[in-house]
Amino acid sequence: MKISQLPILEHKNWGRLCVQIKVLLKFQVALDIMMSGCEKVSEGSSVVEIATHTKNEKKDYETLFLLHQSVDTTNIDKITTTTIVKEAWKILEKCHEGAKKVKVNLKTMRRQCELL
């Protein structure tokens, strides 16, 4: 997939982008990493565990890169300090789910004013 074909998060398209990113990451076999993160390896880990962790860590960075490519400048500023995709995704979810609640509350308040 070309980078220019990635969906871009703008102010009003969080719901659509959320679905598109999850499908893209499922295709890239990275959705689990975004949702649950990479587990740390302990000091006595086997070679297989270390190799698996390295592979998952690489997938995490690839996914974070895709996420960075899929947000506008306003949203990139919110997630640039994160180093794992799970944190970045939670930040975006928190910002945009909150906006959805504000929108619903605004509609409710308008309706109440109309009824007065």
Image (tube, rainbow, N blue to C red):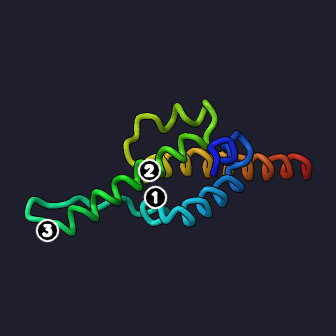
Residue 67 point in image, percent of width and height: 54, 46
Q: Could you classify mark 1 by the number of other residues whose Cα lies within 10 Å: few (under 14), some (14-19), or many (20 or more)?
A: many
Q: Which residue is mark 2?
A: 85
Q: Could you classify mark 3 by the number of other residues whose Cα lies within 10 Å: few (under 14), some (14-19), or many (20 or more)?
A: few
> Which of the two labelled residues, at mark 3 and mark 2, occupies the earlier sequence position?
3
Residue 99 quadrant: top right
> Which of the two labelled residues, at mark 1 and mark 3, occupies the earlier sequence position?
1
Q: Which residue is mark 3?
A: 46
Residue 54 point in image, percent of width and height: 28, 57
Q: 4 or 103: which is nearer to us?
A: 4
Q: Which mark is residue 98?
A: none
Q: 109 or 97: which is nearer to us?
A: 97
Residue 63 point in image, percent of width and height: 48, 51
Q: Amino acid at mark 3?
A: Ser
Q: Could you classify mark 2 by the number of other residues whose Cα lies within 10 Å: few (under 14), some (14-19), or many (20 or more)?
A: many
Check whether the beta carbons of the residues at disc 3 and disc 2 lie within 8 A of each other: no
Helix, strand or loop at label 3? It is loop
Residue at coordinates 44% horizontally, 50% vertically from top-left?
85
Camera-near label (1 vs 3) is 3
Q: Which residue is mark 1?
A: 34
Depicted 18 relative to depicted 44: above or below: above
Residue at coordinates 45% horizontally, 49% vertically from top-left?
62
Helix, strand or loop at label 1? It is helix
> Which of the two labelled residues, at mark 1 and mark 2, occupies the earlier sequence position?
1
Depicted 103 relative to depicted 28: above or below: above
Separation of disc 3 and disc 2 at Cα?
25 Å
Q: Amino acid at mark 2?
A: Val
Separation of disc 1 and disc 2 at Cα?
6 Å
